[in-house]
Amino acid sequence: VILVLIGCYLISTNNLKDLAGLSFKRFENKYLLIPPLLILVFAFSSIVGNFAETNHTIVILFLIQSILLGLSEELFFRGLVQSVLIRKFFERKNAIMFSVVFASLVFAGLHLVNTIRLGGIPLDQLIYSFFAGIYLGSLLLLTGQILPIGIFHGLVNFLFMFNQVLPDYKKLPFIQNQSILEQVVGLIIIILFFSPLLFVGIWQIKRIDKEKISRLIIY
């Protein structure tokens, strides 16, 4: 909760509310939220059978924590970093593309903290988070609302880590225990599986009306 409040405060004090999607004045292209919603429905349907095995209180607390963490990450990386970059470089060519990509790289770099916990470089997380960052960054600029994007992000985090609340959860060995061939094949699968996020994100960025974005910038 504190991180969410800090993110909202930094965005407000830097006059970025409209650009960062914290203003309720603008909510456009709502249909773009349908694919993320369908992804969540499909993903939750695949794990619903496991809920009976869990401690429901722990699951609810974990769900709340995941949503708050996802929202705080969106506020900082898409809401703050991406918006600051767009405003600073707006007059330059491809400023929006650069800002979304750079913010996504910073966001992906954050996942390097897992290096300490897992004992290696989590390349799969870096790839996924970068591709997802491009997609979510474009979604924010086209819809004008960060709240649904933050909730989506949080629910995805919850789904990815849901196995940790199962009674028989066992920490899987990290990538360093795999052969080089297994690592390469695994990364190729990750890239192919999540590449639609990258391609759709880039396509959506190219659809953004720069003139409309210019009206959201306050210096």
Image: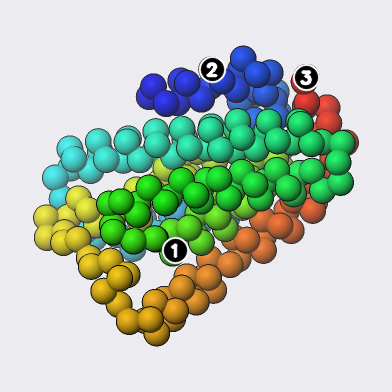
What is the tally of numbered marks visible in this picture?
Answer: 3
Q: Is residue 36 above or below residue 95?
A: below
- Taking the image as drawn, is residue 162 in sight? no
Q: Which residue is mark 2?
A: 9
> Residue at point 59% right, 38% down?
78
> Residue at point 87% right, 36% down?
91
Left or right, 215 with reference to 186: right
The image quadrant of residue 20 is: top right
Q: Which mark is residue 123?
A: 1
Separation (CA) of disc 2 from disc 1 = 33 Å
> Residue at point 20% right, 50% down?
165
Q: Is residue 79 above or below residue 34?
A: above
First along the sequence among labels 3 and 2: 2
User: Which three-letter amino acid code belongs to the residue tagged 3?
Assistant: Tyr
Question: Residue 150's x, y, as percent?
Answer: 50, 38
> Residue at point 66% right, 55% down?
201
Q: Is residue 11 above or below residue 120?
A: above
Q: In which quadrant of the rendered image does the C terminus lie?
A: top right
User: Which three-letter amino acid code belongs to the residue tagged 2?
Assistant: Tyr
Q: Which mark is residue 43?
A: none
Separation (CA) of disc 3 from disc 2 = 17 Å
Q: Which residue is mark 3?
A: 219
Left or right, 91 with reference to 192: right
Label 3 crowd (10 A; few <14 / some 14-19 / many >=20) = few
User: Which three-letter amino acid code belongs to the residue tagged 1?
Assistant: Leu
Under circle 3, the secondary element is loop
Residue that protrudes farthest toward the top in the picture: 13
Label 1 crowd (10 A; few <14 / some 14-19 / many >=20) = some
Separation (CA) of disc 3 from disc 1 = 37 Å
Near-viewer residue (132 or 115): 115
